Image (tube, rainbow, N blue to C red):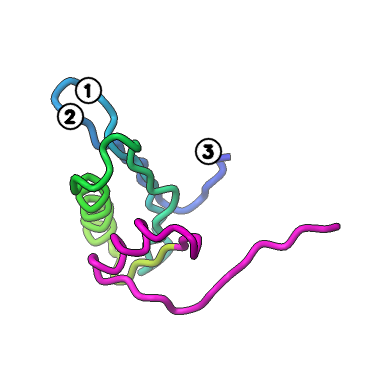
Amino acid sequence: MLENIIPDRCFMLLTDDSGTVLACGLGVLEGEYLGLFNIVTQEKFRNQGYGAKLIKNLLHWGKENGAKNAYLQVILSNAPALNLYAKLGFEEKYKYWYRIKN
């Protein structure tokens, strides 16, 4: 599925000196917009700034490749992620939901 993403993309891993993965995420560049997807920090490394560092690196990559804006989606019940994104300057623009067929 990831190989089918047509726009420029950046898969990023944040590791420590031993190679342990601390956080990972995906940036997809579409014109002047960078979409941030699947931002995850390994549970035992949360609240140590790794998620913010990863996002800042993805934003830097996006800017270096022409992005002037960034967006992401997050589940409303994910309070830690909402808090992190707010600290980085993101704000809610709209709500979304998933639908399933009964």
Distance (Cα) linking label 3 and label 2? 27 Å
Mark 3 sits on what residue?
3
Mark 1 sits on what residue?
19
Task: Estimate the x, y position of residue 73 in percent, counting from the top left.
Answer: 47, 63
Q: Is residue 26 left or right of residue 15?
A: right
What segment is highlighted magenta in the picture?
A: 73-102
Task: Estimate the x, y position of residue 77 in percent, counting from the top left.
Answer: 49, 61
Which circle's residue, 3 or 1, is located before the other in the chain?
A: 3
Q: Dot 2: within a 10 Å radius of its alpha carbon, few (fewer than 14), some, or many (20 or more) residues?
A: few
Residue occupying the point 49% across, 65% down: 76
In depth, the one of 86 and 25 nearer the eye is 86
Work out which residue is located at the far left of the displayed protein and give it: 17
Mark 2 sits on what residue?
16
In the rendered view of the protein, which quadrant contains the N terminus?
A: top right
What secondary structure is found at the residue carrying circle 1? loop
Magenta stretch holds residue 101: yes
Q: Dot 3: within a 10 Å radius of its alpha carbon, few (fewer than 14), some, or many (20 or more) residues?
A: few
What secondary structure is found at the residue carrying circle 3? helix
Distance (Cα) linking label 3 and label 1? 24 Å
Q: Is residue 95 left or right of residue 51?
A: right
In depth, the one of 57 and 81 nearer the eye is 81
Q: Amino acid at mark 1?
A: Gly
In the rendered view of the protein, which quadrant contains the C terminus?
A: bottom right
Residue occupying the point 39% across, 60% down: 79
Task: Estimate the x, y position of residue 32 in percent, counting from the top left.
Answer: 35, 69
Report the predominant secondary structure element of the magenta stretch: loop
